[in-house]
Each structure stands twice: as structure tokens, then as C-alpha cells.
Image (tube, coloured by chain):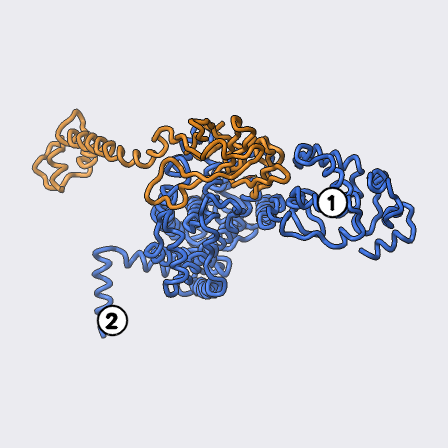
Amino acid sequence: MKSPGAIERTLGWVDDRTGLVAVTEHAMFHKVPRSAKWWYVFGSATLMFFIVQLVTGVLLTTLFVPSAAEAYQSLVYIDEKIPMGWMLRALHGWSSNAMCIMMLIHMTQIFLHGTYKFPRELTWVAGVALCVTTLGLAFTGQIMRWDANAYWGLGIGAAIVDRVPFAGNWLRSVVLGGPDISGATLSRFFALHVFVLPGTAIGLIGLHLILVLKGGISEMPKVGQPIEPETYRKEYESRVKKTGVPFFPDAARRDMVFCGAALIGLIGLAAWYGPFGPGPVPNPTIIEVAPRPDGLFLWLFAVLALLPPYTETFLILVGPPVGIAFLAALPFISPRGERAPSRRPISVIILCIIVTALAVLTWLGETSPWSPVMKAWTSIPTPIEYVRDRSPLELQGAIQLQYAQCRNCHSIGGEGGKRGPALDDVATRLSWDQLVRQIQQGGGNMPAYGKSLSSAETEALAAFLSTLDGGHLPARIPGAMEHQPGRDQSPTADPRAEIDAETDANSDTVAAR
Amino acid sequence: MSERPNEDSTGTDPGSTLPSEAGGCEGCEPAKGGGRRGFLFAAGTTLLTVGGGLAAVPIVGVAIGPAEAGDPNRWISLGKATDFKVGQTVLVKFTNPWDSPTDGDSNLNVCYVRCLDHKKFQVFAITCAHLGCPVEWFAQSRLFMCPCHGGVYYEDGARASGPPPRGLYEYVWRIEDGSFEILGGRLAGLQEST
Ligand code: FES
């Protein structure tokens, strides 16, 4: 055991040569406002998850082979053969999500409390740069999972880059490392994910922390205590001097509790749910895939599906840079004034709109109602009640509905695509003539089937569709049923033909359904 | 180092060991009328610029090389023209005309060949003209559907519905000695495509 004197002497020596001890002491024991409570833990948690990413990431690079020929096999090998390898991948994947979520909550809190104002403008700007870097890490990380989603995700990225006016094609080749997605593409994204972006993040985190120390941790916003750049610094310092507490251990206690709990939560999630993917093999000749981005980018996927085509190129190229520039410019647009959310209604409304929009878009991206269900036509059965008591022509139409892939976009009985309207009660909306016209000519985002269906097939299909009246309503559109050729010829052969007359047969049919 | 200000100072006291405040500041200004200090500064700047420029040649070269490599398209044979059935659209595999040892399966590719008669074809890229997802052909409804955002194309490649801004990309094709060939190698995209 060394005497305390020896320790102090050693520290003194180190500080004399490096100056680091004083800096560390200042960082740990500087006074922070007493009001810095649970709201302030999210930045620390983001940093903790980043450290988890660094440690697990370094280990993963010792196992992962960044070659398009072997990456997939190396991931499977890590998952199945390396002891605890699956857990390492799971930690890296879940921690990446956790880091992004903590970062977004942290940013939201800073925005809501107006902390970006004087004198912490550059802390915010460094934070915005960190946010962009982190999203870059998340996207490139998805590519490292070299599976079908990664391959086609790159294709989507390439198609977006390709839309840049004039330089698009050139830029695309630089990004992909060649004229098409190949081994060189994975290598480029590996370099970004493992060297460039983490290096940038480490630098920016250092800067961010230095700036936090320089500007001091903000107090909770108080109504009637607006930021006046002329006097703020003096007042802040005197308040902190009077009532502040040392960062360690007073304020750090909450960070430690939260980070510890979050870390244990992370380990639980990773152990329970395991690693992400890899999904289907990245073989471009296997095209029965439905590429989807990870949860974090689902909102973007939704945006790309929902933007009107003529605005799309402009918005996807101009939107992100303008959005990021606006975020970074925020403290310069509004450097002073009230910080309390109750006094900044416009900011609160903007925040609510953004959060709601992102949540709705993410949900839409998750359900992706605009995507056809590519296997619906072969894999989903026709509900029995939709074919009971139907005439042969109508049954032929029911087969046609499956066979012509109608169900890839239209559901019946709640199953099938959601791109077009559900067809369960289509006969209450369209007359016979309208049905035939819609099938043949399409319109309203539906392709025309005039060339691919014969007139007999179209007739059968229309005959079946005109029996779909919602299951309990008689066909409301006059003529929807009368003009069915099959029914016109033998109107009494089928009890359902008497629906319009509202006889007992009608209620029988209803009961049968 | 401590001697440099003295060497270069244009000041009055070359013998002093420590530069005066004013002398140091004067020395900071590059090369009043030349002198050794000004020469060194100019030489340093020049050498670093030249060295940086030379180092940038391979660095930038490798970074943007792929974009400068010239036309990657080559004629690729997809088999005998008469092997395609008239009236059918089929998915055909081929290998990209360039590859590297690390490409693995990623140098494989596919396209749709539509045979109108044995002299007339259409060859479609697999990538959706919207954002590049792989479209799937449905022979029954004679439509191509995209699994991503619901783009749909007719059998002749024309846009039918959904977000795509145009029809499917087509490859240029030819028949050489009975062999059906397409000009391929570059990922189809809005720019530089047919
Ligand atoms: S990529 Fe095909 S519709 Fe968007």
C-alpha cells in the first residue's frame, strides 16, 4: 500500500507533465445547477451506448469478413459457431437502436427546454453533426449485415444518388465503387462504418463535451428568466456558485442509475431477442424479396412511397440538407429569450407536429399498405362465404380474381393487399358497367386489365365482384346485378337473384353468410 | 527554437537571448522584404503544397476511380435467340462483365426478356424505375409489380401505376450469329439509360 502522500505525488507528477489531472478534476467536480435532474440523463446514456458500440464493434471486426463473397457466411459463423458470438452481434444491433433513441430523446429535451440558446449554440451545432453521423452509422451498419435487404437497400440508395442533377451517375459510381453493387461497394461502406464515421463521432463527442464544460450545464428553464446574452453568463455563474452542486457525485448519481438500468435493459433485450438478421442471402438473382429498412428508417420508406412523383426528386435531394441546415441554424435564429416551453408555443407545436409525423410515418412504413402482397394470389384462400351459392360464372370470376393477381392489391375477407380498396362491398359502390370499365381501363392508381383479360374473363370477374355487397347489404347500385348475363338468363335459379325483391330468400342468404 | 526569432529578426539587438514582445510580433509577420525567415516560410508552404498535391493523386484517384473507369457496358450473351418462346417474358440470369475476387454472388444479375418474335425483343432491367427495388413479373395479369412502393408496369414496360416516374429501363440488344446479346454492366438508373 502506498501512502496517500505517494498517490498525491504521482498525480502531481502526471499533472505536471500532462495537465490532464486538473482537467479531469474540473470535469468531474465542477459545479452544476441543482435543478439538473432526471431530464439530463439522456446524453450520458447516448454516450454509454456509443461506448458499447465501440467495444462490441472492435470485436466484431475481428470476426466479420468485409468481402461480398464471404460476409454473409462470416455472419452466420459468428452467430452459430463463435461462443457468445450471437450475443455480441445482438448487443451491437440493439445498442445501435438504443443509442439512436437516446440521442433523439436528448435532442428533443434540449429543443424543448431551449438549451440551444446563448451561450450553448455551438454545443447544439456539434450535437446536430453528431446526430447526422450517428444516422450514417446506423445506415452503413445495415449494409454490414450483407443480406438481401442490405443489397436492395444499397440499390435504393444508389437510385436516390442517381437523381442528383448532372452528376448523379458519376456520384453513384463513386458511392458504389463501381458501375453496379459489388464487392467494392461493401468495402467502401465498411471503411465508412468502421473508420470514417466512428472517427468523426469520437472527435465530435470530444468537442461536444468540451463545449458542455465550457458553457456549463444549463438550468431547468424557468418562466420569467429569459436568456439575455449581455448578462446571462454572470448571472448563471453567480447562481451556480451559490446553489450549485459538484457534478460528481451529486448530479452524476442519476446518470449512473439511469445508465446502469439502461445497460441491463440492453443486455436483457439482446439476450431475449437475439441478433438482427442476417436475412435472406444477398443473391441478386433471387428477386422474391420485399426490401424493408430497419425501424429507424421506416418513416423514410413511407415518405418515398407517399410523395407525389413530381415533387419526389426535389424533396429527397433538397429536403434532408435543408432540414439539417435548419436544425443547425436554430440557435442563431433564436439565440435569446424565454426557454420555458410554456412561453414558446410555436416551438412546442413544431415539435408535436414532427413527433406525430414521424410516429405516423413509421407506423405506415411498418404496415406499408401501399406495397402489393406479392404472394397473396397463390397463398391466401378465398373465404367460403364468398363462394357459397355462387353461379358457375361467378365462381369462375372468383378464380379469376386470384389468378389475375387482383388480391395482391385488393383484400377480401380482410386478407390481401391494401394498396387498392377492399372489395368486400364493391358491388355497393360500382355498377356493372363501372366494374367492367374499371377492370378494362383501370384508373385511380389501378392498371388497366383490358389487354391481359379476355372479355369472357372480364365478364366472369365482374359477375363475381357484383355479388360482393358487404355480406349483409343487397346490391345498392341499381343494375349491378340485373345486368349480369348469367343471372339475366336464369333469374330464379339462384335464391340470391331475388335480393332486390327483398324476399325471404334474401334473409336466408344473409343467414347463410 | 528559441534562437529563431533572433536569427530572423530585423530588430536592432541580434545578441539578446529572448525576443522582446514587440520583436516577437514583428517576427511573426512573414518576410518583410524577404530574408531567411520569409524564404523558409515560402519554401515550407510550397513544399507542403507540392507534397500534398502529389499525395492527393493516388488518394483522389482511388476514391473517384470507379466513376472515371470508362464505359463498363459490354455485350453479354443470354443464349440463342431462338431459345426464347414467342409471346413469353422470362427472367434471365447473367454475370456482370467485370468482377473482382471479392464480389461473390453480387456480380450476378438478372433481366426480363420479352420475346415478341424471334427478331423482336424487349429486355427490361430488374430494377424499378422508382427507387430500384426488384420488380416481379406476373404472366397471368401480364404486369410487373414492385414490392416496395407498389409501382406497376405493363408487359411492354410502360408505367401502369404507382410512384415510378417512367417505364422500366430497357437494355439495348442485338442478335449476333444467332446469339441473343444485351449491352449490360452498369446498374440501370434514371441517368444514362434507355
Ligand atoms: S422502388 Fe418500385 S415503387 Fe418504389
Q: What is the number of the mark on residue B18?
A: none
Mark 2 or 1, closer to the camera: 1
Of helix, strand and loop, which one carries label 2?
A: helix
Left or right: B167 in relation to A197: right
**Residue identifier under label 2:** A4
**Residue identifier under label 1:** A396
Q: Position of residue B183 (x, y in %)?
A: 43, 30
Amino acid type for the residue under numbered disc 2: Pro
Comes first in the chain, label 2 or label 1: 2
Q: Which tint is chain B?
A: orange
Residue occupying the point 33% across, 33% down: B65
| Chain letter of the residue beneath label 2 in the structure image | A
How many residues crowd mark 1 within 10 Å: few (<14), some (14–19), many (20+)? some
Can marks 2 and 1 be said to lie on one chain?
yes
Counting labels gives 2
**Up/down of A437 relative to A362, above or below:** above
